[in-house]
């Protein structure tokens, strides 16, 4: 049991910011605010420092595209453009150095996902960044990965005879897969009603969840026209549980997001226009979407940007007009809500997981650093205890 006393506590709830104590007991937030310190608690006086929920990145490949070896990662099953049968949990490596960098800088949960080489990439999973096994770090499966635009075009179109090679081909591939899933659901229902044997298909079972169980479809899309194609296809197939990932040109069609109630997971924006569809990249996107009434989360797409610098991305968005009052929500409560894991993480609500970061300043300001980090109630980082001289870590 721990008691973090004398903190400026940013709860990321309707309570807002309070002064006082955070009590951690049995891996959960037990109490917040003007509360007594329980007998037997280990007391940490944070001396006026800022206490926040652990940060949540709603779009990451941490644990999948490993630190220093991203091209050898386990995030694109490139044997086919449609691979709904695979799941990120089976490729997640708990010893990935990216994860250590993450939790040391306050990022305690990530949505670790398949890549964007395939039109349908597979099941993605919300994970803690600290733990011994992938199973123990799993929060829950949070959606089916899909991708539009240049990545699947290039990944498959450059291989002879492989669809898709155009944007219409990407859209058609997605439609074909969803239509096949609809037919599969019909056949399965008829077989069950008639008491007939039925041969299951793992990929179709997973896609059926999107069509019949509200399992979210999470779509990589940069350009505004690609985003509108996603909206069109979602409406055709009655898919309401949807998020747009990257949303690089989301600011051009912010009202379309708002009209449909679709959230945007924006980023990585600290990035050059390395391909044509990024030519309108700007840190103003989160502010414009927010102003239109869109729920916004900010992401790194690690390792595109290092996972540890999620806070830097928020600071740059604030500099470009994103309301400072919304900064914390964009990397705590909002991504947790988008991922459907807000019962576990994203706030300092009593009863949620004790994922907590203590900062020596406002978390998104460039001069601020973590002093303490807790994941599931474990004191996983103490800057005084765990500080390492980088000269001593150098591999001679």
Image: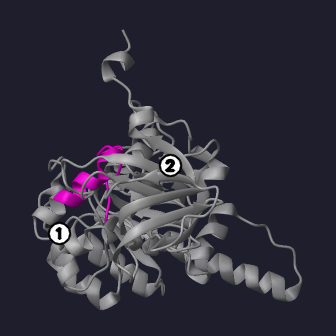
Expressed as whole percent of the image width and height from the top left, the position of residue 34 reads 45, 74
Q: How is the image coloured?
A: one colour
Expressed as whole percent of the image width and height from the top left, the position of residue 225 reads 22, 73
Q: Secondary structure at mark 1?
A: helix
Relative placement, left or right, of 167 versus 31 is left
Foreground pick, 43 / 260: 43
Q: Earlier in the sequence, mark 2 or mark 1?
A: 2
Neighbour tally class for label 1: few under 14, some 14-19, many 20 plus, Cα within 10 Å: many
Expressed as whole percent of the image width and height from the top left, the position of residue 358 reads 38, 54
Instruction: Identify the residue at image location x=81%, y=81%.
Output: 191
The number of callouts visible is: 2
Q: Secondary structure at mark 2?
A: loop
Identify residue for label 1: 285
Find the distance from the CA under tag 2 to the CA under tag 1. 27 Å
Contact check, label 2 and label 1, Cβ < 8 Å: no
Identify residue for label 2: 129
Neighbour tally class for label 2: few under 14, some 14-19, many 20 plus, Cα within 10 Å: many
Instruction: Identify the residue at image location x=47%, y=47%.
Output: 76
């Amino acid at each position: 049991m721990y008691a973090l006393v004398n903190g400026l506590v940013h709860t990321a709830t309707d309570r807002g910011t309070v002064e006082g104590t955070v009590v951690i007991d049995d891996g959960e937030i037990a109490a917040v605010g003007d509360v007594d310190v329980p007998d037997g608690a280990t007391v940490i006086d944070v001396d006026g420092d800022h206490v926040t929920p652990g940060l949540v990145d709603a779009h990451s490949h941490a644990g999948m595209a490993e630190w220093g070896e991203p091209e050898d990662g386990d995030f694109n099953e490139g044997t086919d453009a449609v691979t709904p049968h695979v799941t990120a949990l089976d490729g997640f490596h708990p010893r990935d150095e990216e994860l250590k960098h993450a939790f040391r800088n306050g990022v305690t949960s990530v949505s670790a996902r398949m890549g964007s080489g395939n039109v349908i990439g597979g099941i993605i999973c919300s994970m803690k960044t600290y733990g011994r096994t992938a199973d123990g770090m799993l929060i829950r499966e949070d959606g089916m990965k899909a991708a539009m635009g240049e990545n699947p075009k290039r990944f498959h179109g450059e291989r002879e005879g492989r669809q898709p090679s155009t944007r219409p081909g990407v859209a058609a591939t997605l439609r074909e897969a969803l239509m096949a899933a609809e037919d599969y659901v019909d056949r399965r229902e008829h077989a069950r009603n008639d008491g007939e044997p039925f041969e299951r298909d793992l990929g179709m079972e997973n896609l059926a969840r999107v069509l019949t169980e509200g399992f979210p479809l999470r779509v990589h899309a940069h350009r505004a026209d690609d985003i509108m194609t996603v909206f069109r296809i979602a409406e055709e197939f009655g898919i309401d549980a949807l998020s747009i990932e990257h949303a690089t040109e989301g600011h051009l069609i912010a009202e379309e997001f708002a009209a449909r109630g679709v959230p945007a997971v924006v980023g990585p924006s600290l990035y050059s226009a390395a391909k044509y569809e990024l030519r309108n990249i700007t840190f103003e996107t989160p502010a414009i979407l927010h102003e239109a009434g869109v729920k916004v989360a900010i992401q790194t797409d690690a390792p595109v940007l290092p996972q540890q610098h999620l806070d830097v991305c928020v600071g740059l968005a604030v500099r470009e007009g994103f309301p400072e009052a919304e900064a914390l929500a964009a990397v705590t409560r909002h991504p947790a809500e988008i991922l459907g894991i807000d019962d576990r993480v994203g706030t300092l609500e009593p009863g949620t997981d004790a994922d907590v970061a203590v900062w020596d300043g406002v978390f998104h300001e460039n001069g601020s650093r973590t002093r303490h980090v807790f994941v599931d109630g474990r004191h996983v980082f103490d800057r005084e205890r765990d500080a390492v001289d980088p000269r001593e870590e150098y591999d001679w």
